[in-house]
Amino acid sequence: MGFMQHLYQLDETENRKLRFLYRQGGIAYRHSCIPDYSLPMHDWVFYPKTATVTPFPTVENRMDAYQEAAPRLSLAAIRDCLGTSINIAEITHLITVSCTGMSAPGLDLQLMEMLQMHPSTFRTSVNFMGCYAAVHALKLADALCHTDKNAMVLIVCTELCTLHLQREPTPDNIASGLLFADGSAAAVVTGNDHPYDGLSIKGFYSEVINQGKNDMAWAISSTGFQMTLSGYVPDLIKQDIHPLIEKSLTKAGVSRQDITHWCIHPGGKKIVEAIAKVENLTEKDTAASYQVLNEYGNMSSATLLFVLKSMIPNIIEQPTAHIFGVAFGPGLTMESMVLERKK
């Protein structure tokens, strides 16, 4: 908060409003590839050490920082995911996911080189889809595994949202600066011929709320990537989430009563609250979403995988579990998935 107060040169009334928003956000900690946000000005390494924070970083500055930090963070997430159970040589497909940095050659080729993956590895990238992109990547991986039963698809979602803090203290810029953080998460999806223990994919379902297309947007500008995040988003989701859930469960052949775990993308505290109210969810149902929001903030596409990982210890203790997952992004797009655990 201190950095934003310095940057925006707010008066005491506006500072009080900022402090209030911080307290109400449900976020205690966030992480960034930029150390400046928690350092005194004389120790800054990314932003200029001036009272007015000028000249402000350009798009090129931000992408240079992305090129340096994203591969390292992705590599750490991949190694944590694979552990000692899966050898990198077994990976046949690589899907990289990001909406906070792009280049060609990009993150996919950087990771192939760092991991010494076979040069024939199938690779593709999911870019600029925002917070729901992890579900889209899982959907793509599932399709690849249905095509090739020997496939082993590595997904890595890496977002450096804090690179895109904007100079002007508009409501959208302040909201984004309070909410978004950096993070990376990885997952492996395999075909039926692989014996690894994990969750089974039952199905996917998505819809676009056209009336919300201007309420959540993500665009590249001359000053960086800019987020539009309207206060109406929770209301739009609240209005449309129940029909989406019903259609998703029907498509997956699962009843509402079968769902034992709710993997809700914590796009913000009010979004989780809206879904919980509509679906009569308990504190236990939303605990994982609130925990991730509190400890990490919104890391865009990586966030849903963080929520899912936090639920795993509880899931594996049960003989049978069904997980409903949902995330939201530009469009306004709602992407859902149903996962199953059977011993």
Image (cartoon, grey):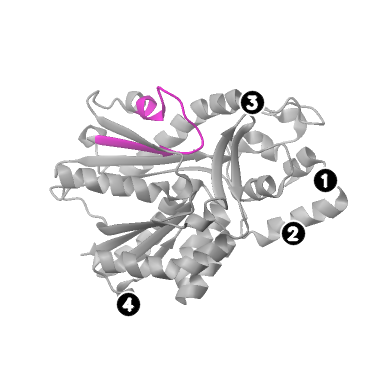
| Earlier-in-chain disc, 4 versus 2 | 2
Does the image show residue 261?
A: no
> Percent x, y for residue 300?
50, 47
The magenta segment is 93-111
Is residue 260 toward the left or the right of residue 254 in the image? right
Q: Secondary structure at mark 1?
A: loop
Toward the front, the furthest residue is: 211
Q: Earlier in the sequence, mark 1 or mark 3?
A: 1
How busy is the neighbourhood of tag 4: few (under 14 within 10 Å), some, or many (20 plus)? few
**Residue 245: x %, y % from top left:** 38, 67
Q: Which mark is first along the chain, 1 or 4?
A: 1
Q: Are marks 1 and 3 in contact (CB under 8 Å)?
A: no
Numbered circle sitting on residue 257: 4
Image position of 160 (left or right of 80): right
Residue under numbered circle 1:
10
- Comparing 74 with 247, the one in front is 247
Find residue 82 and report its image quarter: top left
- Disc 3 target residue: 58
Question: Dot 2: within a 10 Å radius of its alpha carbon, few (fewer than 14), some, or many (20 or more) residues?
Answer: few
Spatial CA span between label 3 and label 2: 30 Å
The kind of residue tagged 4 is: Gln
SS class, disc 4: helix
Distance (Cα) linking label 1 and label 2 = 14 Å
Residue pictured at 16% horizontal, 43% vertical: 147
Work out whether mark 1 precedes mark 2 in sequence or the reverse, and give the earlier one: 1
